[in-house]
Image (tube, rainbow, N blue to C red):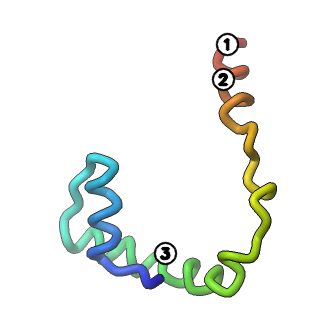
Amino acid sequence: MSVTPERVAAATRTAGLDLAPETAARIATAIAPAFTAFAPVANTLPFDLEPATFLIAQRRERRA
């Protein structure tokens, strides 16, 4: 998957934010190297690396 200004703008619109085209281009340029470096292992990592209990821990902190 390539990071393009159009994809960045679409993702931010989904989140309810509008970006100027030059801002979307700047973000795409900034994060593209990280996506490119991560691409070889992107679909090989086990799901347990993502902390499934994050929301539980986050809610506990809020109550305390």
Q: Which residue is mark 1?
A: 63
Do the CB atoms of the residues marked 1 and 3 lie less than 8 Å apart? no
Q: Nearer the viewer, residue 20 or 13?
A: 13
Question: Quadrant of the rendered structure where residue 28 is?
Answer: bottom left
Give the Cα distance between marks 2 and 1: 6 Å
In the shown orientation, is residue 28 left or right of residue 23? right
Question: Which residue does the numbered mark 2 point to in the structure image?
Answer: 59
Going by the numbered disc 3, the residue's amino acid type is: Ile
Q: Which residue is mark 3?
A: 31
Which is nearer the N-term, disc 1 or disc 3? 3
Rendered view: 40 above or below 26: below
Badge 1 local density, few (<14 within 10 Å), some, or many (20+)?
Answer: few
Sequence order check: which comes first, mark 3 or mark 2?
A: 3
**Residue 13 location (% of width, % of height):** 26, 55
Q: Secondary structure at mark 2?
A: helix
Image location of residue 2, percent across then percent down? 44, 84
Marks 2 and 3: in contact by CB < 8 Å? Answer: no
